[in-house]
Image: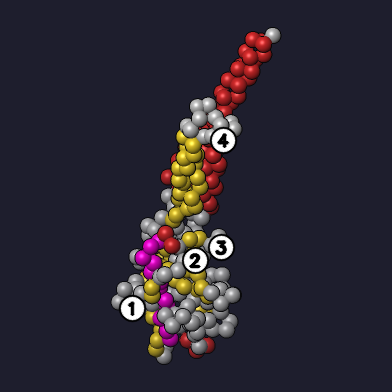
Amino acid sequence: MDIPAYVLLSNEQALRRRMDVVANNLANLSTSGFKREQPVFHEKVKATQGEIPAGRQVSFVLDYGATHDTAEGGFNATGNPLDVAIQGPGYLSVGLADGSSAFTRAGKLGVLQDGRLADAAGRPVLGDNGQPLTVPPEAQGRLRIGQDGTVEGPGGPLGRIAVTLFADEAAVSPRGDGLMEGSGGRLLPPGETRLRSGGLESSNVQPVAETTAMVEILRAYQSSQRMGEALNDLRRSAIGRLGAFRN
């Protein structure tokens, strides 16, 4: 077993994973409600077997997934009364085609042809009763969303937008389609819900920090490659000396 090569390989795989996450963060710089991600790595220590010296411990890098930064993004005013931003923790609930639900902080809402309140991708927004909010034809274009999530038309309240809070944000993970999935959340009551209409939450990605991280990753990768080349040179030198000695 070539221990140095395996250690360098595990490190380079971790660097590639970090680069993928940073690139995804930068790609979502303008995505409403996006939370920057940070990869999580663990150290895996393994005792060598059949090596010299035997029983020596070697440390590898183990990819343990990613976590997201829960810091709140800035408020981007749009003037659209159906655009909402969550102030504080929590997520909007949207219904999926298979009957399940997912979560998002992207509050760009609109009304579908069938009258259901939906997000920008056409997924129905769920109310505090777990059902999609429906807007009657006479109320469309005349809606108002209150701070507690209540959707009001000319005739009065039509329902309340559900905001779900997770005590452990580690239980919430990206699905890969702009939505989050999680379990164990609780529905916030009106007194704890804080929505601000007329705008959207910006991404919390800091472009300068992500660009700096990208440069650091590139330099670390180049350093790892140079170490690999140096190890190859040592091997070639050792093989050459052993060959000369045997001759």
Considering only order in the chain, which callout, 1 or 3, is on the residue closer to the N terminus?
3
Q: Residue furthest right?
A: 247
Say above or below: 58 vs 230: below
Asked if disc 3 and disc 1 are in contact, CB closer than 8 Å, the reply is no
Q: Amino acid at mark 4?
A: Tyr
Q: Give the residue displayed 34% in from the left and 71% down from the top.
A: 194
Give the Cα separation between the discs numbered 1 and 2.
23 Å
Say above or below: 49 vs 87: above
Helix, strand or loop at disc 4? helix
Query: What residue is disc 2 on?
Result: 181
Task: Please state which of the two labelled residues, at mark 1 or mark 2, is closer to the viewer.
Answer: 2
Extent of the magenta region: 158-169
Task: Please state which of the two labelled residues, at mark 3 or mark 2, is closer to the viewer.
Answer: 2
| Left or right of residue 20, residue 74 in this image | left
Considering only order in the chain, which callout, 2 or 4, is on the residue closer to the N terminus?
4
- Please identify the quadrant where the C terminus is shown: top right
Q: Position of residue 205 (x, y in %)?
A: 44, 52
Crowding around mark 1 (Cα neighbors within 10 Å: few <14, some 14 to 19, many 20+) is some
Q: Give the residue displayed 56% in from the left and 62% down from the top.
A: 177
Task: Please state which of the two labelled residues, at mark 4 or mark 1, is closer to the viewer.
Answer: 4
| Left or right of residue 148, residue 59 in this image | right
Considering only order in the chain, which callout, 1 or 4, is on the residue closer to the N terminus?
4
Q: Amino acid at mark 1?
A: Pro
Considering only order in the chain, which callout, 2 or 1, is on the residue closer to the N terminus?
2
Give the Cα separation between the discs numbered 3 and 2.
11 Å
Asked if disc 4 and disc 3 are in contact, CB closer than 8 Å, the reply is no
Chosen colour scheme: secondary structure
Query: What residue is disc 4 on?
Result: 6
Marker disc for residue 177: 3
Give the Cα separation between the discs numbered 3 and 1.
29 Å
Query: What residue is disc 1 on?
Result: 190
Quadrant hosting residue 187: bottom left
